[in-house]
Image (tube, rainbow, N blue to C red):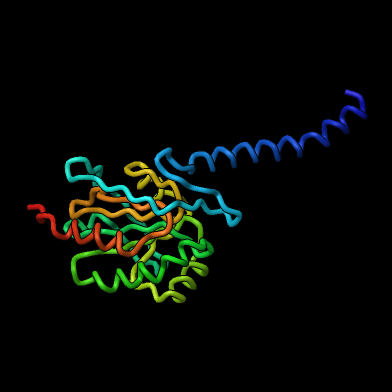
Amino acid sequence: MTPLAGARAARRAPRALVAAALTVLVGVLAACGPAQEQSTDTTDDGYVSGDGSTKTWAPGDRQGPVELAGTDYEGTAQDVASWRGDVVVLNTWYAACPPCRAEAPDLVAFANEYAEQGVRVLGLNSTDEAGAAQAFQRTFDVPYPSLEDTSGQGVLALQGVVPLNAVPTTVVLDREGKVAARVVGLLDASTLRTVVDDLLAEPVPS
Protein backbone atom coordinates (compact mmCIF):
# COMPACT_ATOMS: atom_id res chain seq x y z
CA MET A 1 0.00 0.00 0.00
CA THR A 2 1.36 3.44 -0.91
CA PRO A 3 1.74 6.13 1.81
CA LEU A 4 -1.14 8.08 0.24
CA ALA A 5 -3.44 5.04 0.24
CA GLY A 6 -2.48 4.30 3.82
CA ALA A 7 -3.39 7.83 4.90
CA ARG A 8 -6.75 7.58 3.18
CA ALA A 9 -7.45 4.26 4.89
CA ALA A 10 -6.53 5.77 8.25
CA ARG A 11 -9.03 8.59 7.69
CA ARG A 12 -11.74 6.12 6.67
CA ALA A 13 -11.32 3.92 9.78
CA PRO A 14 -12.92 6.31 12.32
CA ARG A 15 -15.78 6.91 9.88
CA ALA A 16 -16.35 3.18 9.63
CA LEU A 17 -16.42 2.85 13.41
CA VAL A 18 -18.98 5.67 13.68
CA ALA A 19 -21.14 4.07 11.00
CA ALA A 20 -21.00 0.73 12.80
CA ALA A 21 -21.97 2.37 16.09
CA LEU A 22 -24.91 4.12 14.44
CA THR A 23 -26.04 0.82 12.95
CA VAL A 24 -26.02 -0.78 16.40
CA LEU A 25 -27.92 2.19 17.87
CA VAL A 26 -30.59 2.01 15.19
CA GLY A 27 -30.96 -1.69 15.90
CA VAL A 28 -31.42 -1.03 19.62
CA LEU A 29 -34.03 1.66 18.97
CA ALA A 30 -35.84 -0.61 16.57
CA ALA A 31 -35.87 -3.38 19.17
CA CYS A 32 -37.47 -0.96 21.63
CA GLY A 33 -39.91 0.37 19.06
CA PRO A 34 -43.68 0.09 19.27
CA ALA A 35 -45.78 -2.84 18.25
CA GLN A 36 -48.24 -2.13 15.45
CA GLU A 37 -51.14 -1.85 17.87
CA GLN A 38 -49.54 1.14 19.59
CA SER A 39 -48.85 4.69 18.46
CA THR A 40 -45.50 5.93 19.73
CA ASP A 41 -43.03 8.63 18.80
CA THR A 42 -39.34 9.07 19.50
CA THR A 43 -38.71 12.51 21.00
CA ASP A 44 -35.68 14.76 21.07
CA ASP A 45 -35.22 13.92 24.77
CA GLY A 46 -34.32 10.32 23.98
CA TYR A 47 -37.36 8.55 25.39
CA VAL A 48 -40.04 6.76 23.42
CA SER A 49 -43.42 8.23 24.23
CA GLY A 50 -46.60 6.18 24.14
CA ASP A 51 -50.15 7.33 23.64
CA GLY A 52 -51.53 5.95 26.90
CA SER A 53 -53.05 2.91 25.17
CA THR A 54 -54.35 0.34 27.64
CA LYS A 55 -54.60 -3.39 27.03
CA THR A 56 -56.15 -5.84 29.49
CA TRP A 57 -56.22 -9.63 29.53
CA ALA A 58 -58.94 -11.92 30.82
CA PRO A 59 -57.83 -14.35 33.56
CA GLY A 60 -57.50 -17.29 31.18
CA ASP A 61 -55.33 -15.32 28.75
CA ARG A 62 -52.80 -13.88 31.19
CA GLN A 63 -49.10 -14.67 30.83
CA GLY A 64 -46.75 -15.25 33.72
CA PRO A 65 -46.15 -15.30 36.55
CA VAL A 66 -43.61 -12.51 36.21
CA GLU A 67 -40.26 -13.22 37.85
CA LEU A 68 -38.64 -9.88 38.68
CA ALA A 69 -36.10 -9.30 41.43
CA GLY A 70 -33.27 -6.92 42.18
CA THR A 71 -31.98 -4.23 44.52
CA ASP A 72 -33.65 -0.87 44.98
CA TYR A 73 -31.85 2.48 45.25
CA GLU A 74 -31.74 2.17 49.03
CA GLY A 75 -29.88 -1.13 48.77
CA THR A 76 -32.84 -3.32 49.76
CA ALA A 77 -33.56 -6.56 47.91
CA GLN A 78 -36.98 -6.65 46.22
CA ASP A 79 -38.63 -9.73 44.70
CA VAL A 80 -42.05 -9.66 43.04
CA ALA A 81 -42.41 -13.40 43.71
CA SER A 82 -42.68 -12.66 47.44
CA TRP A 83 -45.76 -10.52 46.73
CA ARG A 84 -47.94 -13.31 45.37
CA GLY A 85 -51.45 -12.75 46.70
CA ASP A 86 -51.16 -8.97 46.19
CA VAL A 87 -51.95 -6.93 43.10
CA VAL A 88 -48.69 -5.42 41.80
CA VAL A 89 -48.19 -2.31 39.68
CA LEU A 90 -44.86 -2.12 37.82
CA ASN A 91 -43.78 1.19 36.28
CA THR A 92 -40.75 1.82 34.07
CA TRP A 93 -39.28 5.31 34.40
CA TYR A 94 -36.20 7.49 34.58
CA ALA A 95 -35.66 10.91 36.10
CA ALA A 96 -35.26 13.03 32.95
CA CYS A 97 -38.28 11.52 31.16
CA PRO A 98 -41.01 14.22 30.89
CA PRO A 99 -44.04 11.88 30.91
CA CYS A 100 -42.52 9.98 33.85
CA ARG A 101 -42.40 13.23 35.80
CA ALA A 102 -45.91 14.14 34.67
CA GLU A 103 -47.44 10.89 35.93
CA ALA A 104 -45.40 10.67 39.14
CA PRO A 105 -47.88 12.60 41.35
CA ASP A 106 -50.73 10.31 40.25
CA LEU A 107 -48.68 7.18 40.93
CA VAL A 108 -47.67 8.51 44.35
CA ALA A 109 -51.29 9.30 45.23
CA PHE A 110 -52.38 5.87 43.99
CA ALA A 111 -49.69 4.06 45.98
CA ASN A 112 -50.63 5.88 49.18
CA GLU A 113 -54.35 5.30 48.62
CA TYR A 114 -54.09 1.56 47.86
CA ALA A 115 -51.27 0.59 50.23
CA GLU A 116 -53.66 -0.95 52.76
CA GLN A 117 -55.72 -2.78 50.14
CA GLY A 118 -53.16 -5.39 49.18
CA VAL A 119 -51.60 -3.42 46.30
CA ARG A 120 -47.85 -3.03 45.74
CA VAL A 121 -46.10 -0.54 43.46
CA LEU A 122 -42.58 -1.10 42.14
CA GLY A 123 -40.58 1.13 39.82
CA LEU A 124 -38.06 -0.15 37.31
CA ASN A 125 -35.30 2.21 36.20
CA SER A 126 -32.76 1.08 33.61
CA THR A 127 -31.14 4.49 33.09
CA ASP A 128 -30.31 6.35 36.30
CA GLU A 129 -27.57 5.97 38.84
CA ALA A 130 -28.60 6.31 42.47
CA GLY A 131 -28.11 10.09 42.70
CA ALA A 132 -30.53 11.03 39.92
CA ALA A 133 -33.09 8.39 40.91
CA GLN A 134 -33.11 9.33 44.58
CA ALA A 135 -33.44 13.02 43.73
CA PHE A 136 -36.55 12.15 41.68
CA GLN A 137 -37.92 10.10 44.58
CA ARG A 138 -37.39 12.98 47.01
CA THR A 139 -38.91 15.54 44.65
CA PHE A 140 -42.16 13.59 44.29
CA ASP A 141 -42.10 12.02 47.79
CA VAL A 142 -42.28 8.54 46.24
CA PRO A 143 -43.37 5.98 48.88
CA TYR A 144 -42.57 2.84 46.88
CA PRO A 145 -39.22 1.31 45.88
CA SER A 146 -37.65 1.21 42.43
CA LEU A 147 -35.22 -1.40 41.16
CA GLU A 148 -31.85 -0.13 39.92
CA ASP A 149 -31.69 -1.91 36.56
CA THR A 150 -28.83 -0.33 34.60
CA SER A 151 -27.81 -3.87 33.65
CA GLY A 152 -31.15 -4.24 31.85
CA GLN A 153 -31.82 -7.65 33.40
CA GLY A 154 -35.10 -6.58 34.97
CA VAL A 155 -36.46 -5.12 31.75
CA LEU A 156 -35.33 -8.24 29.91
CA ALA A 157 -37.19 -10.48 32.36
CA LEU A 158 -40.36 -8.43 32.05
CA GLN A 159 -40.02 -8.10 28.29
CA GLY A 160 -40.12 -11.88 28.05
CA VAL A 161 -43.68 -11.85 29.37
CA VAL A 162 -45.17 -8.58 28.11
CA PRO A 163 -43.82 -6.19 25.42
CA LEU A 164 -42.46 -2.93 26.79
CA ASN A 165 -42.94 -0.48 23.94
CA ALA A 166 -42.23 2.84 25.66
CA VAL A 167 -40.95 4.61 28.74
CA PRO A 168 -42.99 4.97 30.80
CA THR A 169 -44.92 1.71 30.62
CA THR A 170 -47.11 0.48 33.48
CA VAL A 171 -47.82 -3.23 33.91
CA VAL A 172 -50.39 -4.53 36.39
CA LEU A 173 -50.06 -8.05 37.78
CA ASP A 174 -52.92 -10.03 39.29
CA ARG A 175 -52.66 -11.83 42.63
CA GLU A 176 -50.92 -14.77 40.93
CA GLY A 177 -48.25 -12.52 39.42
CA LYS A 178 -49.66 -12.77 35.89
CA VAL A 179 -49.94 -9.80 33.53
CA ALA A 180 -53.48 -8.44 33.69
CA ALA A 181 -53.00 -5.03 32.06
CA ARG A 182 -50.48 -2.77 30.36
CA VAL A 183 -50.52 0.99 29.78
CA VAL A 184 -48.04 2.29 27.19
CA GLY A 185 -47.02 5.88 27.81
CA LEU A 186 -48.42 8.50 30.17
CA LEU A 187 -50.66 6.86 32.74
CA ASP A 188 -54.27 7.90 33.29
CA ALA A 189 -54.95 7.65 37.02
CA SER A 190 -58.62 6.76 36.65
CA THR A 191 -57.77 3.95 34.25
CA LEU A 192 -55.26 2.48 36.70
CA ARG A 193 -57.78 2.62 39.53
CA THR A 194 -60.42 0.89 37.41
CA VAL A 195 -58.03 -1.92 36.43
CA VAL A 196 -56.82 -2.43 39.99
CA ASP A 197 -60.33 -2.29 41.49
CA ASP A 198 -61.41 -5.01 39.06
CA LEU A 199 -58.45 -7.18 40.06
CA LEU A 200 -59.12 -6.66 43.76
CA ALA A 201 -62.67 -7.84 43.16
CA GLU A 202 -61.50 -11.12 41.62
CA PRO A 203 -61.54 -14.23 43.83
CA VAL A 204 -58.41 -14.70 45.89
CA PRO A 205 -56.46 -17.74 44.59
CA SER A 206 -56.63 -20.72 46.92
Q: Measuring 25% from the left and 49% from the top, which residue is drawn there?
A: 180
Q: Left or right? Give the position of 132 relative to 199.
A: right
Q: Is residue 112 above or below residue 91?
A: below
Q: Nearer the viewer, residue 102 or 157?
A: 102
In the rendered view, does 103 fall on the left or right side of 181?
Answer: right
Residue plotted at (13% across, 59% down): 201
Q: Quadrant of residue 26?
A: top right
Q: Is residue 159 above or below residue 199?
A: above
Find the residue positioned furthest to the top: 1
Q: Is residue 162 above or below residue 103?
A: above
Residue at left offset 38%, top offset 43%: 163
Q: Residue 155: where, in percent of width, then height?
A: 40, 49
In the image, is 53 to the left or to the right of 62?
Answer: right
What percent of the width, then of the height, locates residue 187?
Answer: 38, 60
Residue 40 spot, x, y in % from top left = 48, 47
Q: How many marks?
A: 0
The residue at the point 20 percent across, 61 percent down is: 197
**Depth order, front residue of 138/46:** 46
Quadrant holding the N terminus: top right
Percent position (x, y) of residue 3? 92, 29
